[in-house]
Image (spheres, rainbow, N blue to C red):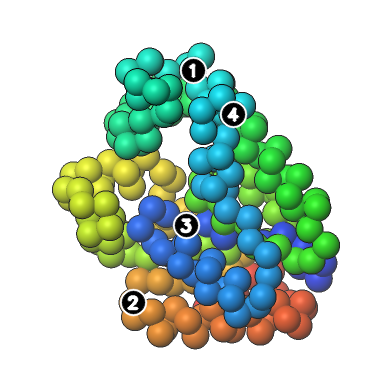
Amino acid sequence: MQKDFKTVHSIGITGGIGSGKSRVCRQLTRICNLPEIDLDRICRQLLQKDEPGWQALTTVVDESLFLPDGELDRKGFRQALFSDNELRARVDAVIHPLARSATASLIAASDSMVLVEIPLLYEAGWQDDVDMVVVVYALPEVCRQRIMERDCVSAKEAGLAMDAQYSLEKKKENGDVVIDNSGAWQNTCTQIQNLAEWLRCNEIKEKRYDKL
């Protein structure tokens, strides 16, 4: 069913690891002065000791992924998720419903247009939970280099992290708006500014923009 972009309330910001979606989201938030919901922040809260996500996690992962004080070994947990598809599926099955419910509640509670950063929006199948999807794209080699520099990991480890997500090319095809963050940040900012101007007008003539 075609979306009605004349009544946009929630805007999902997604992309791939290393594409720069968080930076784009922060810039758009600043320019438009809109509230932001960060799914990673929600998940971090859920996975704190004794929180609902942490409790659910104890039923599906090995105790070796927890520190002696009971807190989740987040670095070891992340590495395990990237290398074990079966583990990732078990974790998603218990964490995604909790995160989705929390996100939906925050969107509903907002009395203005809201930006929602959801890294795994398409992987989780949440694209219909928001009114518009903005995909932050970058070339694979650019994403890989950014991951290596940011996380101090090898090219192989960066590749595993990228392979654990849906193809960024497919996300680009499915997005309502695409921000290409492959090149200079100033070029990206121009695209963000164009999107911000449209959001201020809150009107659209076509279903999606291929170029901003």
User: What x and y, as percent, mark residue 174?
Assistant: 56, 57
Q: Quadrant of the C terminus?
A: bottom right
Q: Mark 3 or mark 1: which is in front?
A: 1
Distance from Cα at disc 4 to Cα at disc 1: 11 Å
From the top left corner, tell me how far across and down residue 106 is, in percent: 73, 50
Label 3 is placed on what type of residue? Gly
Residue 91 shown left or right of residue 159 in the figure: right
Judged from the image, the secondary structure of the residue bearing numbered disc 4 is loop
Specify few, some or many for label 4: CA neighbours under 10 Å numbering under 14, 14-19, or 20 or more: few
Amino acid found under the numbered disc labelled 2: Gly
Q: Which badge, 3 or 2, comes first in the chain's sequence?
A: 3
Q: Which mark is residue 183?
A: 2
At label 1, counting other C-alpha atoms closer than 10 Å, the crowd grade (few under 14, some 14-19, many 20 or more) is: some
User: What residue appears at the point 73 percent right and 81 percent down from the top-left corner?
Assistant: 200
Q: Is residue 180 above or below residue 79?
A: below
Residue annotated with mark 1: 58
Left or right of residue 142, residue 111 in this image: right
Residue 71: in sight, yes or no?
A: yes
Q: Which residue is mark 3?
A: 15
User: Label 3's element?
Assistant: strand
